[in-house]
Image (cartoon, rainbow, N blue to C red):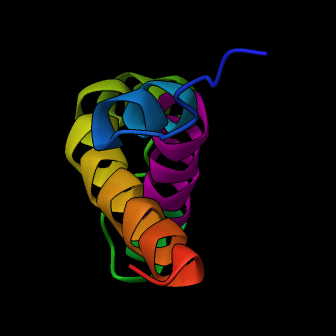
Amino acid sequence: MMATDTTWSVKKLALVLYPFTAAAVAINLFLLGLIGISLGLPAISPVTSIWLGIPLGIPATWWAAKWVRGLMDEADGK
């Protein structure tokens, strides 16, 4: 059998994690908007939260992928 490369680069991890991370960012933005209501700020609609979560999810995904890659390296003893 041929040995296959099973390493996950940060880029690969980021591609897999992006939908989840962007959704988490959108949810957090929406909840932040709910907190803002108590401070007298206007509410953030769910659709606005999703639209803002798409670009803001990119740096959050990169950070999460680097963190997961570090955990994987630690588990492998590197």
Q: In the rendered image, which quarter is residue 63 located in?
A: bottom left
In depth, the one of 4 and 20 nearer the eye is: 4
Q: Residue at x 52, y 28 (%)?
A: 5
Task: Locate residue 38 relative to residue 52 in the image: left or right.
Answer: right
Q: Is residue 25 magenta?
A: yes
Q: In the rendered image, which quarter is residue 78 located in?
A: bottom left
Give the answer, above or below, for where 68 lies relative to 65: below
Q: Residue at x 36, y 25 (%)?
A: 54
Which image quadrant: the N terminus? top right
Q: Residue furthest front?
A: 1
What secondary structure is the stretch in magenta mostly built from? Answer: helix
Give the answer, above or below, for where 5 lies relative to 7: above
Q: Residue at x 49, y 84 (%)?
A: 77
Give the answer, above or below, for where 21 lies relative to 19: below
Instruction: Read off the magenta span.
Output: 18-33
Task: Locate residue 61 relative to residue 62 in the image: left or right.
Answer: right
In depth, the one of 17 and 57 nearer the eye is: 17
Give the answer, above or below, for where 63 lies relative to 62: below
* Number of numbered callouts drawn: 0
In depth, the one of 5 and 51 nearer the eye is: 5
Q: Residue at x 26, y 36 (%)?
A: 58
Q: Residue furthest top?
A: 2
Residue 50: x and y in percent read 48, 28
Residue 29: x and y in percent read 43, 54
